[in-house]
Image (tube, grey):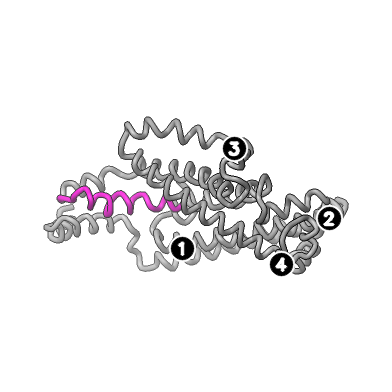
Amino acid sequence: MTGRLSPAADAGRGGPDAVRHALALRRPLALGGKALRSITAIRVDLLGLVGLVLLFVGWQLLTNVVPRYSLPTPLGVAGRIWDDFILAKYLSAYGLPKTGLLNSMLYTGSNVLIAVGLGGAVGTIGGLVTGRFEKVRAVLDPVLMTAGTIPILVLAPFFLIWFGVGRTSAVLLVAIYVSVILYIFAQRAVDNLDPVYEEAAYTLGASPRRMIWDVLIPGTVPQILGGVRIALAGAWGLEAIAELLGSQKGIGKIVQVLAGSIDMQGIFAALVLLGLVAVIFDALAALLFSYVAGWSVAARTGGN
């Protein structure tokens, strides 16, 4: 025991180096660790691909028993995405400007990223603060928990009145949802942080600033990143709903106008494109988070 801690003690005469050394002991040091994670990630990706294939196969089989006007075929939807990707001329008949699925998806995607960034920052900071200060937690918990239980369909009319039908109302609606999710994850991350690391840091003379940067942030980031993936996955659907309830652009607006004419193939095309983009962004987020916090299962899987 003494031999293992002596390097930290020797390096820790200045304080911060010892804290870093103590935290490093928590990370896997096996030479084959990175290779094992890569194999696991490939296996999970292949299983996800199999799931998507099974989904489309099941969809195709259902079209044999369900009328085509209510359930278009996957190939028909794919062709519609191709035809409407750059410009969908028929949308002008519904009062929309000249646009296509691409421009609408860019609008929806930018709203999602802005909302996740804004709500994530607010929720993460709030969760970290309340995880450390019980009195602040007692004040903010009822407010955030109440906000998280209010359905978006109830909040949307108020936001449309207060902020209009532009981008602001949709972004704020999604940001509220994201902030509640990240608030909970950040707070739990602080609660789950093993006290032994903080005690070791204090013993080795770490300052409050070093406690934040060398213990609190490294110890909570993996779970927070897992929460970001969960919030991002839900934000796409919420953004589409917000646009459907009141917006002049976006995938949700396309779904709204096509629902009036019962254009099921066009609706499916918009929703399938939205789903594919959501899957791609989740895969990119998983790749980024595994690089940032590769030692943690929570960051890679979105778990607690």
Which label lies toward us, 4 or 1?
4
The residue to which callout 4 is attached is 85
Describe residue 98's horizontal placement relative to residue 186 as left or right: right
Residue occupying the point 44% across, 53% down: 225
Residue nearest the viewer, comparing 153 with 302: 153
Q: Secondary structure at mark 1?
A: helix
**Coordinates of residue 89 in the picture (x, y in percent):** 78, 65
Q: Residue 158 bears which disc, if any?
A: 3
Is the residue 124 above or below the residue 150 in the image? below
In the image, the segment drawn in magenta is: 205-227
In reply to whether residue 223 is colored magenta, the answer given is yes
- Residue type, numbered disc 4: Phe
Q: Please, what is the dominant secondary structure of the magenta stretch?
A: helix
The residue to which callout 1 is attached is 288
Q: Secondary structure at mark 2?
A: loop
Q: Residues within 10 Å of mark 4 (few under 14, many from 20)?
A: some
Which label lies toward us, 1 or 3?
3
Q: Residues within 10 Å of mark 3 (few under 14, many from 20)?
A: few
**Coordinates of residue 52 in the picture (x, y in percent):** 67, 59
